[in-house]
Amino acid sequence: MRLISPQWSAPSITHAFITTRSGGLSRAPYESLNLGDHVGDDFAKVIGNRKIVRSHVPSEPFWLTQTHSTKVSTPLSRQDLQGGDPITADASVTNVPNEVLAILTADCLPIFFSSKDGCVIGAAHAGWRGLCAGVIENTASEMLNLSPGLSPKDLVAWLGPAIGPESFEVGADVVKAFQDAGLSDPSKAFKTIENKSGKYLADIYQLARDRLNILGITDISGGGHCTVKEGQDFFSYRRDGKTGRFASFIWISK
């Protein structure tokens, strides 16, 4: 199993990694370390894959039912769950040591957050809808609620593997959505496609950086992968349609 560790300025007590598609049990088109239980894969294979990953984290991860929302799961909201009910949210935060946050993606952008002292962390699933609607802002807000003495400048972020700026074709409606949401200079994140009227190439990494910078988070790393082009390592819904999901995990050590 090949794991990717983020290169960022988070403290040593903040631990994080991203899985790739290798080292699991699933068969094509989910080959092989598919961690998504909602994509049509053999459920027993998914459970087996999650057991493989479980040996690399200190506790059972908090898996989310992701819906492209801006809802954030917090330690308090997770306490309200009964009988292991699924958590419906697109981001998680915690200040509890060894509580493992997990995000599933296959083109959308996984984002890690950490305070510079490691007292609070977060993870967000950011497709363009979530980015536009405020999933970054909500994640940071919940982190600051857990550590009231902090401000956005005390947070660092890492942008995980997502669809790259040469592969993410969108329509004019997406450009307009970000303009309406306050994106000051869309030319930085959207490039017109020659001979394709009303079509653009979107840079999801730039869109995330813009939102983070506006919020006051300027220590930002990552953003160099393309899930569509790097098929050996990553699942891609845009490329394959029927496919698996890789996962991003983050926790604070005791």
Image (cartoon, rainbow, N blue to C red):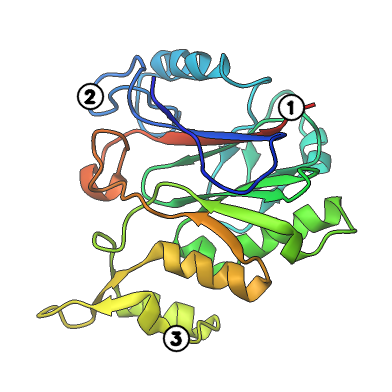
The Cα–Cα distance between marks 3 and 2, rounded to whole angstroms, is: 42 Å
Residue 77 in the image: x percent, y percent? 79, 42
Question: What residue type is disc 3 on?
Answer: Asp
- Write down the quadrant of residue 192 in the picture: bottom left
Q: Earlier in the sequence, mark 3 or mark 1?
A: 1
Label 2 is placed on what type of residue? Ala
Mark 2 sits on what residue? Answer: 28
- Please report the residue visible at 62 percent of the width from the left and 49 percent of the height from the top: 9
Which of discs 1 and 2 lies nearer the camera? The answer is 1
The residue positioned farthest toward the left in the image shown: 195
* Sequence-wise first label, 1 or 2: 2
Residue linked to disc 3:
185
Could you tell whether 118 is left or right of 137 in the image?
Answer: right
The residue lying at 65 percent from left, 21 percent from top is 60
- Where does label 1 land, which residue? 98
Name above or below for residue 170 compared with residue 17.
below
Quarter that holds the N terminus: top left
Describe residue 227's horizontal placement relative to residue 4 as left or right. left
In which quadrant of the rendered image does the C terminus lie?
A: top right
Q: Residue 53 has which mark?
A: none
Q: Considering only order in the chain, which callout, 2 or 3, is on the residue closer to the N terminus? A: 2
Residue drawn where x is 80% and y is 64% of the image = 151
Q: Secondary structure at mark 2?
A: loop
10 Å crowding of disc 1: few (<14), some (14-19), many (20+): some
